[in-house]
Image: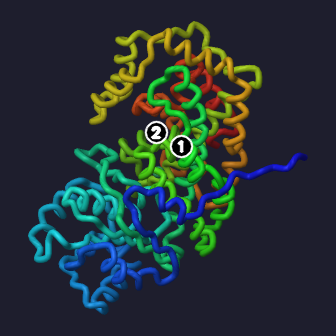
Amino acid sequence: MGQETKPPVLSLEDCLKQAEETKELILKPRALEEIPGLLNKFFSNKGACLIADRNTFDAAGRKVREILEGAGIKIAWEHIFPGEPRLHAEYSHVREMKSLIPALPGYPELVPVAIGSGTVNDLVKCAAHELKLPYLCVPTAASVDGFTPNGAALLMDGFKQTVPCAAPLVLAADTEIIARAPAFLSSSGFGDLASKIIAGTDWIIAEKAGSAGAPQAPAIDPLCWAMIQNGLTDALNRSVKAARGDSEAINTLFKSLAVTGFAMQHYKNSRPVSGTEHLFSHVWEMEDLSLNGVPVTHGHKVTIGTLAATAFTELFFADPKGPPSPGRGFTRPSREDRKAEVSAAFKGSRAHDGVVKTAIEKLMDDQKAETVNQAVRDSWKELRDKVLDRLLPYAELRALLEKAGCPVRPETIGLTRDYAIATARRAQMIRNKYCILDLSWDMGNFEAILAKIEGSGAYLR
Ligand SMILES: [Zn+2]
């Protein structure tokens, strides 16, 4: 064997420097004790507003209050959402904060302090942004890739949307608190991290398609690639025990998830960190997927999406000689037929009009699509090698996810297998962000691949 040179893994500090908005991340045991110092250093400090839910308040909020009071920092407002039923990221909560905070003494120099990584953080992030207040985040779990990016996933009029808003200026993450988080939250974070494999393979595919004229298919940004992809497999292997509370594993998982947000702050959109797998989860988010009345976590939906996307990618690139042939009798639909197809797939959904618009916007004319397809066929070996080099084979991925306590069967998150597979059709329609589903759809082998997944004894079982 020749000498293999591994690409350099960037440190957390180096990645933080690339973040446009976040200035500091303290990650260590007893990090909460640093909050008074952070407030003095980074904020014009006339008092703090603590926002938590009952669970995150018990995990960290009470301690933050104690520390602030001990340091003589005024708590201008404290708001604790109920812990049960699980808090939804409803925009109405943002509206409420927006009406209450400006009436408090000390405004507009108050500092919102979000106690929580997921929903609480998304709500505070959006409210703080709309009130033009920089905020501080106290993550309580490594549960999601969303605590550091400049955007929040919110339900607006019943429809989950990513709302652009400023990232936390500062984060204080206490590793002991994060390690005590419930196992299902850490396994959710693990699944969200595993999804970065597909973000990588999709970017390789998009770069090739984009070079031949496909829309929303940018070339790979080497810095963002290095931030997310170098060391990803290693980070996954090292964080596999996170859901069991292993502190080393939790640390690695938390750092890797934090970096995804820094890459998004640098790149200004989600291309470096999400692909086909998040499209599956977005569809299930629109449907408010829950199991026995409890909403399925973002990370667990993404986990099943990652398995589905891996199966799809693996089958697309199965043959060293070339991509799967188009199905018999395949013809590309006209604009009108496509519009009718997408409209029917989202009939009755609040997302209907937006999805129809997006699907038509990204529809390439036949000639352009053929140019892209030909470019892929012409460079098949090189493209296939690159993608398979990044992709974790399905069986290995499944074993890793299972070891990490993640769901690996659609039924575990309340979906039938057939329904999970069929979601690929709608996942392909919802975003103008070139991925494997688009390439396969344009080549006419989309249905043939879905049929192979359906008929397989291994995929999504
Ligand atoms: Zn995610």
In the rendered image, residue 218, in percent from the top left (x then y), is placed at 50, 33
Closer to us: 434 or 339: 434
Q: Is residue 456 above or below residue 340?
A: below
Taking the spot 37% from the left edge, 73% from the top edge, the residue there is 56
Tag 1 near tag 2, CB within 8 Å = yes
Q: Name the residue under label 2.
A: 279
Q: Is residue 391 above or below residue 174?
A: above
In the rendered image, residue 10, in percent from the top left (x then y), is placed at 60, 59
Q: Specify the label residue 340 is tagged with.
A: none
Q: In this view, does 133 lie above or below 343?
A: below
Q: Mark 1 points at which residue?
A: 305
Q: Is residue 86 visible in this depiction of the protein?
A: no
Taking the spot 62% from the left edge, 31% from the top edge, the residue there is 454
**Residue 310 falls in image quadrant:** top right
Q: Which amino acid lies under the numbered mark 1 shown in the image of this protein?
A: Gly
Left or right of 255 on screen, residue 381: right
Q: Is residue 225 visible in this depiction of the protein?
A: yes
10 Å neighbourhood of mark 1: few (<14), some, or many (≥20)?
many
Taking the spot 34% from the left edge, 83% from the top edge, the residue there is 36
